[in-house]
């Protein structure tokens, strides 16, 4: 069964997902990357020009097209859980892993990041706290597994997720190269 990663911006969906896919020798798909290919500009530019609602429409389209391929790790955008149809699609077609982080840890990671439109505000930590309160219940609703990501390294998180996936019978580790 394919695996999807959900969580707030900066929780590591893209970075951890890519390494997890490498380790499993699975395909890696990032919905934000697919969206950027489709819109032909960066997500930040698109937010500024067309607004968040249009972005969410395209995000829902892209998520709706996923999920038929086994041996895939899908990294979503942080807001993928906002729409009920997306939550249903993720929960049904994927084994969903929630990368759970505190707003403070995310702020430490993202305070100099200019790519995330929702955090280009006067008080990004306040914004992360609001996003956490609004979305933590949605991530929990959709997830089959939840992993705390504040302190561990990307490598350690990959090992923990692999253990969970094996315990759940979702993935079998390929033989080690040495
Ligand atoms: N567990 C971690 N430890 C250290 N740095 C991390 C960790 N997870 C993510 N990062 C770094 O934080 C930044 C944001 O990660 P990213 O994968 O883009 O998050 P997301 O896709 O969830 O928004 C990247 O520079 C990434 O390398
Ligand atoms: O949290 C959000 O609503 C968003 C998160 C972003 O992805 P990351 O979670 O990978 O930053 C991207 O999809 C867009 O900027 C909206
Ligand atoms: Mg990402």
Image: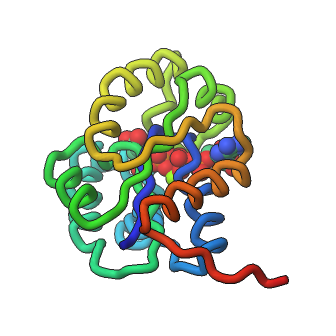
Query: Could you say where residue 167 lies in the image, as x and y percent from the top left?
Result: 49, 59
Residue 32 visible (yes or no):
no
**In screen coordinates, is 131 left or right of 68?**
right
Instruction: Determine the residue positioned at 35% across, 49% down.
Output: 144
Q: Nearer the viewer, residue 174 or 112?
A: 174
Q: Where 40 falls versus 140 (above or below)?
A: below
Which quarter of the figure is the C terminus placed in? bottom right
Task: Name the image quarter holding residue 161.
Answer: bottom right
Q: Nearer the viewer, residue 59 or 102?
A: 102
Instruction: Determine the residue positioned at 62% across, 56% down.
Output: 15
Query: Could you say where residue 48 lies in the image, as x and y percent from the top left?
Result: 38, 43
Query: Could you say where residue 58 lies in the image, as x and y percent from the top left?
Result: 25, 61
Color theme of the render: rainbow
**In screen coordinates, is 102 left or right of 150?**
left
Instruction: Determine the residue positioned at 45% across, 79% down.
Output: 71
Task: Name the image quarter holding residue 176.
Answer: bottom right
Which quarter of the figure is the N terminus placed in? bottom left
Q: Where 107 falls versus 177 (above or below)?
A: above
Query: Could you say where residue 32 lies in the image, as x and y percent from the top left?
Result: 43, 60
Instruction: Determine the residue positioned at 28% across, 46% down.
Output: 142
Q: Nearer the viewer, residue 142 or 125?
A: 142
Tag count in the figure?
A: 0
Give the farthest residue toward the right. Answer: 178
Q: Where 116 falls versus 76 (above or below)?
A: above
Give the farthest residue toward the left. Answer: 85
């Amino acid at each position: 069964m394919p695996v999807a990663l959900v969580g707030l911006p900066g929780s590591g969906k893209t970075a951890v997902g890519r390494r997890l896919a490498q380790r499993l020798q699975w395909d890696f798909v990032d919905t934000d990357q697919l969206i950027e290919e489709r819109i032909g500009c960066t997500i930040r530019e698109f937010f500024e020009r067309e607004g968040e609602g249009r972005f969410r429409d395209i995000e829902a389209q892209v998520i709706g097209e996923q999920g038929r391929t086994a041996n895939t790790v899908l990294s979503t955008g942080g807001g993928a859980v906002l729409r009920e149809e997306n939550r249903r699609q993720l929960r049904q077609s994927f084994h969903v892993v929630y990368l759970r982080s505190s707003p403070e840890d995310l702020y430490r990671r993202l305070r100099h990041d200019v790519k995330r439109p929702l955090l280009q505000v006067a008080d990004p930590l306040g914004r992360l706290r609001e996003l956490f309160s609004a979305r933590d219940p949605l991530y929990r609703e959709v997830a089959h597994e939840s992993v705390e990501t504040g302190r561990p390294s990307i490598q350690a998180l990959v090992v923990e997720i692999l253990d969970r996936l094996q315990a759940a019978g979702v993935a079998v580790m390929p033989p080690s190269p040495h």
